[in-house]
């Protein structure tokens, strides 16, 4: 069984959560978002690297290798 395709706007939801987090988190706060690997992921990751000092992309060991999802963790400075 494989992960279903993301619902429409999945990347938009992550961007909206990031916007909220950047407005509310204190310096040193952390943000984690589950993201769909697809056409927009590289551009989104580059945007994050411009905005934040630390950006970590991770696929958990428990995740199936064919799963198109991964997590991005950020540290607000």
Image: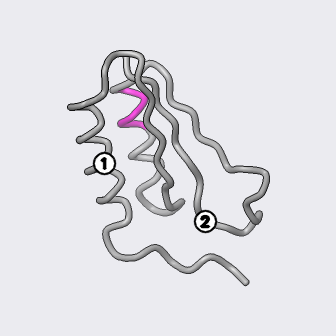
Decide whether residue 4 is among the magenta residues: no
Q: Residue furthest left?
A: 23
The residue that appears at 30% across and 37% down in the rendered structure is 21
On the rendered structure, is 61 left or right of 56?
right
The residue under the point 45% across, 29% down is 30
| Residue lying at 68% horizontally and 50% vertically, measured from the top left | 59
- Give residue 51's mark: none
Where is residue 5 shown, x and y percent of the image? Answer: 51, 78
* Quadrant of the snapshot with the N terminus: bottom right
Q: Is residue 1 above or below residue 50?
A: below
Left or right of residue 18, residue 39 in this image: right
- 58 vs 46, nearest the viewer: 58
What is the magenta segment's predominant secondary structure? helix
Residue bearing the label numbered 1: 17
Q: How is the image coloured?
A: one colour
22, 25: nearer the viewer: 25
Q: Residue at x 34, y 16 (%)?
A: 27
Q: Residues within 10 Å of mark 1 (few under 14, many from 20)?
A: some
For disc 2, the marked residue is: 68
Examine the structure image and report whether residue 49 is included in the region drawn in magenta. yes
x and y percentages locating residue 77 in the rendered image = 37, 15
Q: The residue tagged with tag 2: helix, strand or loop?
A: loop
SS of the residue at dot 1? Answer: helix
Q: Position of residue 23 (x, y in %)?
A: 21, 31
- 67 up-or-down from 42: above or below: below
Give the magenta-colored segment's residue range. Answer: 46-50
């Amino acid at each position: 069984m494989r992960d279903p395709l993301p619902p429409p706007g999945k990347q938009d939801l992550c961007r909206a959560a990031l916007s909220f987090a950047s407005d509310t988190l204190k310096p040193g706060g952390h943000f984690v978002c589950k993201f769909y690997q697809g056409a927009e992921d590289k551009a989104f990751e580059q945007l994050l690297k411009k905005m934040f000092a630390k950006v970590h992309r991770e696929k958990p060991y428990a995740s199936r290798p064919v799963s198109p999802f991964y997590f991005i963790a950020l540290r607000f400075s």
